Image (cartoon, rainbow, N blue to C red):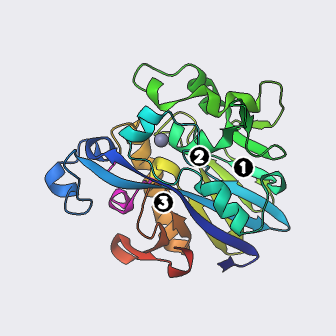
């Protein structure tokens, strides 16, 4: 769809499943299961939602999903389907990976950064977007290299270290930044130390890619958050601020893991109105 001078394409790059308890933390199952019915293993349907934007002739990829490097065992554990989604979708848009100018991942967890790298025909890890600048918070990078004991399984170094090992493709950010005209990054932390939200602007119009600050539609309730968040109170504070602005200024909001109509607007009383042109 077109949002002012922004051309936006939503890509659902992966379909997979996550444990309901992981997704909803301390929220009782009797409340969340009405909205996200779990299967027999307590797993709920998830997607990895990515956005391709074109603005002033530049191509910006936001979020890269799980990618193709996941071990068979882990892929089975999370019931992963369609791992090649990102590159297929780019091809359909007539964009080659080398034509991507900027890549933003909201954080470096395996289900957001996996698509930054892939395996070549010899099984070696290579960069997916070899000519793009990659914007990552320095605090996220440092934490991903030395995570706390609970966060360790969420980071896979092959996803991101090749960007800096022998390459110079990362721009480390220390907080908020405008990385290209109208392409703003807001450091929110909370879910991980360096979690960030991408805000694309065209005049008065804007689109926000939330990352795991808001995973799915039930997470639009401020106190409904993931068990994996390292600083839940900061999540509540930053989420309330973002949702307030999004409602007031009619921002298009893109939710990171919602499998069913993940882009939409907030209306009075926190009601969600999906954007049918972006599904
Ligand atoms: Zn995450």
Query: In the figure, is residue 232 to the left or right of 88?
Result: left
Is any part of residue 178 visible from this angle? no
Q: Dot 1, how many residues are within 10 Å of its Cα: few (below 14), some (14-19), or many (20+)?
A: many
Distance between the Cα atoms at labels 2 and 1? 10 Å
Q: Is residue 209 above or below residue 175?
A: below
**In the depicted structure, whether residue 168 falls above or below residue 150:** below
Circle 1 sits in a helix, a strand or a loop, which is it? strand
Question: Badge 2, how many Cα within 10 Å: few under 14, some, many 20+?
Answer: many
Residue most toward the front?
122
| Cα distance between the residues tagged 3 and 2 | 12 Å
SS at mark 3 in the image: loop
Give the numbered dot on residue 235.
none
Q: How many marks?
A: 3
- Check whether the beta carbons of the residues at disc 2 and disc 1 lie within 8 A of each other: no
Q: What's the magenta region?
A: 214-225
Q: Residue furthest left?
A: 30
Residue that numbered label 2 is attached to: 106
- Residue 105 % position (x, y): 63, 46
Q: Which mark is residue 255?
A: 3
The residue carrying mark 1 is 103
- Seen in the picture, residue 277 relative to 227 is either above or below; the reply is below
Q: Residues within 10 Å of mark 3 (few under 14, many from 20)?
A: many
Residue 217 % position (x, y): 37, 63
* Disc 2 Cβ-to-ligand 1 distance below 8 Å: yes
- Residue 154 magenta-highlighted: no
N-term-proximal mark, 3 vs 1: 1
Is the residue indicated by label 3 positioned so its CB lies within 8 Å of ligand 1?
no
Quick one: SS at disc 2? loop
- Name above or below for residue 25 compared with residue 92: above
Residue displayed at 65% across by 63% down: 89
């Amino acid at each position: 769809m077109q949002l002012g001078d922004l051309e936006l394409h939503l890509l659902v790059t992966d379909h997979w499943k996550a444990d309901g308890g992981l997704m909803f933390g301390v929220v009782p199952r009797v409340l969340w299961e009405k909205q996200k019915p779990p299967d027999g293993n307590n797993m709920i349907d998830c997607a990895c939602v990515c956005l391709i934007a074109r603005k002033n002739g530049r191509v910006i990829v936001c979020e890269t999903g799980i990618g193709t490097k996941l071990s068979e065992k882990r892929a089975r554990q999370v019931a992963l389907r369609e791992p090649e989604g990102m590159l297929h979708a780019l091809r359909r848009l007539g964009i080659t990976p080398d034509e991507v100018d900027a890549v933003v991942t909201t954080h470096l967890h395996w289900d957001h950064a996996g698509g930054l790298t892939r395996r070549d025909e010899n099984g070696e890890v290579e960069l997916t977007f070899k000519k793009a600048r990659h914007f990552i918070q320095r605090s996220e990078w440092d934490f991903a290299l030395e995570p706390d004991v609970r966060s360790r399984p969420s980071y896979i170094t092959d996803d991101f270290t090749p960007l800096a090992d022998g390459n110079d493709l990362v721009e480390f950010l220390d907080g908020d930044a405008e990385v290209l005209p109208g392409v703003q990054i807001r450091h929110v932390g909370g879910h991980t130390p360096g979690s960030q939200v991408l805000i694309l602007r065209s005049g008065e119009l804007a689109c926000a890619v939330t990352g795991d600050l808001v995973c799915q539609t039930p997470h639009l309730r401020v106190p409904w958050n993931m068990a994996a968040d390292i600083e839940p109170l900061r999540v509540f504070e930053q989420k309330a601020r973002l949702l307030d602005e999004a409602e007031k200024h009619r921002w298009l909001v893109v939710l990171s893991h919602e499998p069913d109509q993940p882009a939409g607007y907030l209306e009075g009383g926190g009601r969600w109105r999906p954007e049918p042109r972006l599904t």
